[in-house]
Image (spheres, rainbow, N blue to C red):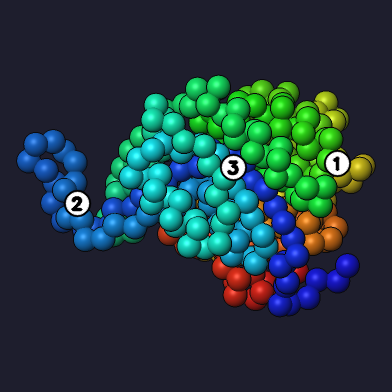
Amino acid sequence: MSVTSPRDFSSVRLLVMGDVMLDRYWFGDSNRLSPEAPVPVVLIEDIRDTPGGAANVALNVANMGAQIALFSVLGRDHEGDILRELLERQNVECSFSYNEAFRTIVKLRIIARNQQIVRADFERKPDRELLKPVVEKFREALLPTDTVILSDYGKGGLSHVSDVLAITREKNVKVLIDPKGSDYSAYRGATLITPNRAEFAQVVGTWSNEAEFERLAFGLRDRLELEALLVTRSEEGMSLFVGDRHIHILAEAKEVFDVSGAGDTVISVLATALGAGYSLEEATRLANSAASVVVSKLGTAPITRDELNSLKT
């Protein structure tokens, strides 16, 4: 299909499941070291909270005008309330399970003069049994016309991934996965996975040339019985492996300020475009262009509707 602007994704419905978190930023200035230890003293001037992880994926989808439902687990805490409010304000349908024993994941970053000084993580893996209601909610909501994104940040929110994939096979829907870890066997049978270069190397090992890279990529795709594999390669662009083709899409020249959330934007744009009927190559090229926009922003920041419509692919 031809890709035109403005892009209308209002008829597309996506379901996102995975690890949600609150990305919290403390902004300030620093002009001296602490007398207590050789570390900078930051005078905090502003605080900003944004959805992170799978929640940022959902926010990207909502910003593109598509219908989006998000499935995950939250703690019954103030941070969980903030995260839900931020999402619902942006038209994300939240289907969360809650538990007093679980703590909403928070990543706190202290920023001084546009430089990250330190990051503090507050997290606790959810009990496997706690996630069963999330899977059942997903099963009840899934329609044959949906596209599904599984956003794995290794925080335990996708410990039932095999059950989720079985449900999607029953409905014959596309499933795209942003993977984590060194063992991808649980992702077998997905439509596509989107590891970055480092994640891919962690699973298949290193390579010394492009031919070896291709061999490893096709081998992984075939072992996992995927329709396609997309490896994001930072300054080298993206490599899509589909059929017998390796489609190498060059990175678009922009100043890289912060790569936080770039993978979230890639998979959200890719899935939304596929749901709208784009070919896999067209969708990947659009996702590549969108990623070039978000890496020029500070912190986790989704693509906006205006930014998406301004892209030429």
Residue 42: which numbered mark, if any? Answer: 2
State the mark number for residue 285. Answer: none
> Which residue sits at x=9%, y=36%?
36
Q: CA distance from mark 1 to mark 3?
A: 19 Å
Question: Residue flagged by tag 1: what amino acid is it?
Answer: Asn
Q: Quadrant of the C terminus?
A: bottom right
Specify the label residue 172 is tagged with.
Answer: 1
Q: Can residue 204 be seen at all in this image of the molecule?
A: no
Q: Residue at x 57, y 45 (%)?
A: 95
Residue 162 location, quadrant = top right
Q: Which residue is mark 3?
A: 71
Residue neighbourhood size for the residue with mark 1, other residues' Cα within 10 Å, grouped as few (<14), some (14–19), many (≥20): some
Disc 3 marks which amino acid? Phe
- Count the labels in the image: 3
- The secondary element bearing badge 1 is classed as loop
268 displayed left or right of 78: right
Question: Which residue is rendered at x = 53% and y = 42% of the image?
Answer: 96
Nearer the N terminus, badge 3 or badge 2?
Answer: 2
Amino acid on which disc 2 is placed: Val
Badge 2 marks a residue whose secondary structure is strand
